[in-house]
Structure formats: C-alpha cells, structure tokens
Amino acid sequence: MTPLRIERLALIGLGLIGGSLSLALKSAGVVGEVVGYSRQLPTRLRAQELGLIDRAVDSVAAAVHGADVVFVATPVQAMAGVFADLAPELSPTALMTDGGSVKGAVVAAAKSALSAAQWAQFVPGHPIAGTEHSGPDAAFATLYHNQRVILTPLPENSPALVARAETMWHTAGAVVERMTVQHHDHVLAATSHLPHLAAFGMVNALARLEERYEVFRYAAGGFRDFTRIASSDPVMWRDICLANRGELLPMLDHYLAELTQLRAWIDAGDAPAIEQQFAEAKAVRDALYRPPAAR
Ligand code: NAP
C-alpha cells in the first residue's frame, strides 16, 4: 500500500462524519491542512475550535480551491448544490469522495453538476459507522476503527484514484469493501434505513398515546435499545428516506407484511405460529451477535 499523503483536505460538512474523518487523518499525521466549509458560521467556528479543521472558509469554492482531496459530508439532498458550487474550483488531479448514506441519488446529482473529466474524479463512498449524535461536537478520531466503509466506484474512475480513496479509509482505521451503487442502496435500505423508520415510528406511536407519560415512565432497557437511533438527526434521515425511496418503500412494505401477519396470529390466538415466528427471529439474531469465542 502506497503511504498516504494529503497536502490539503477540503471538508464540506463539518459534523460527525466529516469531522471524524479529519480527526482520524490528522491523528495519523497524513494531512497537511484541513480547510472546512459548512452552511452556518457557528458550525464552522466550532469545528475550528475543536481542531476538526485548520481553516474555516465561507464558501464551498474557497474550501475546494487547491485541495488534493475533497470530502463531502453534508445531508444527501444538499449534495447537488455542493457539487455545483465545487465544480469550478476542483483541481483536475484531486480525489473527490463523499460519505452520503444513499449512493444512487448522490451519483446522479454529481453527474449532472460535474464535467465528464470531473465525474471520473468522484469515487462515491459510505462509511457504515455512526452514532445518533450530530454536529462538530459529535466527531471523534476513532469512529471508523474496524468499521466498514463501502466504496461504489464508477466505471470511469481510474484504479489509482479508487486505490487512493481506499488508502484514505484504511488510514482512518476502516475496512473497505466495494459494491455497485444499486446494490448498496438495496442492502442499506434493509439494514439501516428501515430500522431507522421503525425506531422513529415506534417512538411517535407511543408519544401519541394519551397515557404517554405513564408509558414512558415504565419504558425499560428494551425500549431504550430499540429506539436509540430515533435520536438521529431529522434532516439527515428525511433526506435519506426521500433519496432512497425506490428501495425503501418495497422494504417498508415487506416489514409491514410481517407485522400484519403477526397481528393476525395474535388476533386468532395462534400460539404455535407466534412462537415459531419468535423462535426464528431469535435464532437469526443470536447467530448474528454471538460472542466471537462462540463462533
Ligand atoms: P451532521 O453531523 O449533521 O453534519 C452535517 C454537516 O453538514 C454540518 O456541518 C452542516 O453544517 C453541514 N451542512 C448541512 N447542509 C449544508 C449545506 N447545504 N452546505 C454545506 N454544509 C451543509 O451529519 P453527519 O452525521 O456527519 O452526516 C453527514 C453525511 O454522512 C450525510 O450524508 C449522512 O447521510 C452520512 N452518514 C451519516 C452517518 C451517521 O450515522 N450519522 C453514517 C454514515 C453516513 P451546518 O450546521 O452549518 O448547517
């Protein structure tokens, strides 16, 4: 693996995902300067104060000017505007990549904003790491340690550029995998987007009950575990649901069918069917999360 050196990293979006990448690369000592832009001045100042960036600038273009790596980590629906703003300043040798949770919509936005040559410089990516916290204060240097990052390279990307993106993530501590854009969006709709919908829906269902105060007073660890991700950023998740609606809606229907079936068995008092359903789910989950020694 060629050692990584980034002279100037442009960070667009200074929250959990962008800030953590910057901290990881800085702590690995591979980056000269990090120049950052986000929409709001207080966010930029806070990012600088926390050391996520060395220099805050007041436009996407100013951040990208002279950068050899550009990382876009805004909510996905904001990326079209970011790509349009960065195009005039993108160095012809720079690597451009992103951390968006949906790839199809982001790739389409990049294609319409960039020239053909710039399009070949874009290596789309998605770190499968995160927390329910957001903003500059949520960032930490070890977020990506031993976590997966999915790259969805484009046919137009050069192998050297994809290798550079891979090396960057390895340097941040991640394990890199590759898949197609379409496959990414299908798999992530199931493993990430649907569980977030379930958590948001569960919290709201209980919050709308008349007896909600009592219900929440008796909510125990199970409710807390199940709904942790409902504390995630609403704008980010609004964008993900809309940007991946083509994959998410069939997945949601699939889940609703499971619940509808369960409802019917409970209504009918069908104990064997209910038990069988729960036993199957328990076996799957136990196998997924068995302690390493027992595998
Ligand atoms: P975050 O902590 O909320 O940070 C988002 C950043 O984007 C903020 O600095 C915000 O700045 C900035 N921003 C918002 N709109 C902008 C715009 N129009 N132009 C420029 N900057 C803008 O979010 P995050 O968790 O880092 O997520 C960033 C991306 O990573 C998203 O695309 C998300 O889908 C993806 N992702 C998230 C997770 C996760 O678990 N959180 C995991 C994997 C991937 P202001 O405060 O100035 O508006």
Image (spheres, helix red, strand yellow):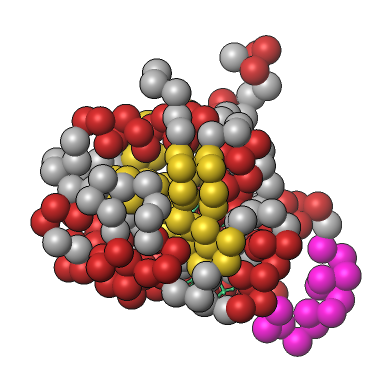
Q: Nearer the viewer, residue 5 or 25?
A: 5
| Quadrant placement of the C terminus | top right
Q: Residue 285 lies in what quarter of the image?
A: top right
- Rendered view: 252 above or below 215: above
Q: Nearer the viewer, residue 279 or 183?
A: 183
Q: Is 27 displayed left or right of 87 in the figure?
A: right
Q: Residue 147 lies in what quarter of the image?
A: top right
Q: Residue 209 lies in what quarter of the image?
A: bottom right
Question: Magenta includes 9?
Answer: no
Residue drawn at x 68%, y 47% is 140
Place of residue 6 in the rendered image (x, y in percent of width and height, measured from the top left): 45, 40
Q: Is 277 displayed left or right of 250 in the figure?
A: right
Place of residue 146 in the rendered image (x, y in percent of width and height, measured from the top left): 57, 29
Place of residue 150 in the rendered image (x, y in percent of width and height, measured from the top left): 39, 39
Residue drawn at x 29%, y 59% is 90
Outermost residue on the bottom side: it is 210
Q: Is residue 60 visible?
A: yes
- Rendered view: 51 above or below 289: below
Place of residue 12 in the rendered image (x, y in percent of width and height, measured from the top left): 47, 63
- Rendered view: 61 above or below 2: below
Residue drawn at x 52%, y 30% is 171
Per the rendered image, the range of residues in magenta is 207-219
Q: Is 88 displayed left or right of 204 in the figure?
A: left
Q: How many marks?
A: 0
Q: Is residue 272 visible?
A: no
Residue drawn at x 56%, y 30% is 173
| Quadrant placement of the N terminus | top left
- Rendered view: 204 above or below 26: below
